[in-house]
Amino acid sequence: MSSTVKASPSNNFRPKLNFLYGGSGISFGSRVNVALSKPRVPEVLCMSTPTTTTTQHQVTPMSKHNDVAILVNGCTGNMGKAVISAAYSAGLHIVPVSFGSTEEAGQMVEVCGKDILVHGPSDKESVLASVFDEHPNMIVVDYTVPAAVNDNAELYSKVGVPFVMGTTGGDRDRLYKIAENSKVYAVISPQMGKQVVAFLATMEIMAEQFPEAFSGYSLQVLESHQAGKLDTSGTAKAIISCFRKLGVSFDMDQIQMIRDPKKQIEMLGVPEEHVPGHAFHMYHLKSPDQIVSLKFQDNVCGRSIYAEGTVDAVLFLSKKVKSKAGKRIYNMIDVLREGNMR
Ligand SMILES: NC(=O)C1=CN([C@@H]2O[C@H](COP(=O)(O)OP(=O)(O)OC[C@H]3O[C@@H](n4cnc5c(N)ncnc54)[C@H](OP(=O)(O)O)[C@@H]3O)[C@@H](O)[C@H]2O)C=CC1
Ligand SMILES: O=C(O)C1=N[C@H](C(=O)O)C[C@H](O)C1
């Protein structure tokens, strides 16, 4: 049975960003149909189909970036598929290996016309080491689940393979410690959409230059994502850290999470076709006497903004590895600062 990842125009949707003031193969197994194992909507549109050469462990589009190889962990997930599509369009090698649960081990999945072999937890370290040996220019991209963040970072760090961690959640302090202690190269960011990252950078600058500027102000934070999102928004947490430096008192558990499609459409105006893939963040500051109000909002529909940013992060990290840069742990603001704002 061969699997097909159907095209959907939704991943091409341009983000709307508002700032409102006021209002992976060592052996081969069975092939599965990704769509049958778990419905994931919206599906990925494979943007282009460059000429390819295929060997056992690599699928090679003909392009300027084909000296960079990526292994996407979580390849059957929404972001995994979006990244494979964007990376393929950019001409990166897609290493046809990924990792998953014991039940998924040995399954061959097809994403954007590429057969990717999923390995289980038991042999992940030996498989990754072997693949890295075969592709020394490889970077792992992780879009899995919050509960896997720390173990996965430990795996990449132990093998020494550079990684881009897009997955949110887990123990973030531990994540940084694991990466720093191993001296591995990594880009870690809960937000890969560069325009949203530019907003985050602006907030960091504001917090640095005007500490306590909003002292006494109250803050209301609301974030809306597809119902399958397991954790509270990592982006919201990063922005709130800036508001705290600006003098605002706010606990992360005060974040209002909206996961109900009805509310998303009726209250927030999420376009119905983007209910399965959107990220809206709203931050509302009010003065102690309630007479001054500031609102910041970013509304992203689809996932292309993150997939494209991830490809830029991979290219950025690849350069850092090649140049043997002294600094090893980066975030997306570092990627923007290098002029990767396209
Ligand atoms: N940094 C950024 O800009 C962005 C970050 N994200 C974050 O990325 C993560 C993934 O999001 P999304 O793709 O929407 O989620 P999905 O649920 O669509 O995909 C997660 C995938 O990870 C797989 N998986 C689960 N556990 C493991 C494991 N231990 N090893 C390998 N694969 C595993 C799942 O398989 P199965 O279903 O079989 O369990 C699934 O295929 C989330 O944390 C999300 O918040 C999302 C968008 C942007
Ligand atoms: O799960 C998502 O979809 C997203 N996760 C990230 C987060 O938690 O902030 C980034 C974006 O919001 C999309």
Image (spheres, rainbow, N blue to C red):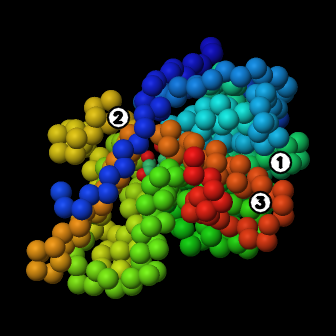
Whether 85 is drawn above or below 204: the answer is: above
Whether 40 is drawn above or below 337: the answer is: above
Q: Where is residue 66 in the image (x, y as percent from the top left)?
A: 79, 36
- Nearer the N terminus, badge 2 or badge 1? 1
Which residue is at 64% across, 48% downward? Answer: 312
Q: What element carries label 3?
A: helix
Q: In which quarter of the image is the N terminus?
A: top right
Q: How far apart are marks 2 and 1 (CA)?
A: 36 Å
Quadrant position of residue 220 = bottom left
The reply to whether residue 18 is visible in this rendering is yes
Residue type for callout 1: Asn
Residue pointed to by mark 3: 320
Residue pointed to by mark 1: 137
Residue type for callout 3: Lys
Q: Position of residue 33 (x, y in %)?
A: 57, 21
Q: Where is residue 249 in the image (x, y as percent from the top left)?
A: 29, 80
- In the picture, measured across the screen, residue 189 lies left or right of residue 71, that is left
Q: What element carries label 2?
A: helix
Mark carried by residue 160: none
Looking at this rendering, what residue extends furthest in the right direction?
133
**For the residues bearing labels 2 and 1, Cβ distance under 8 angstroms:** no
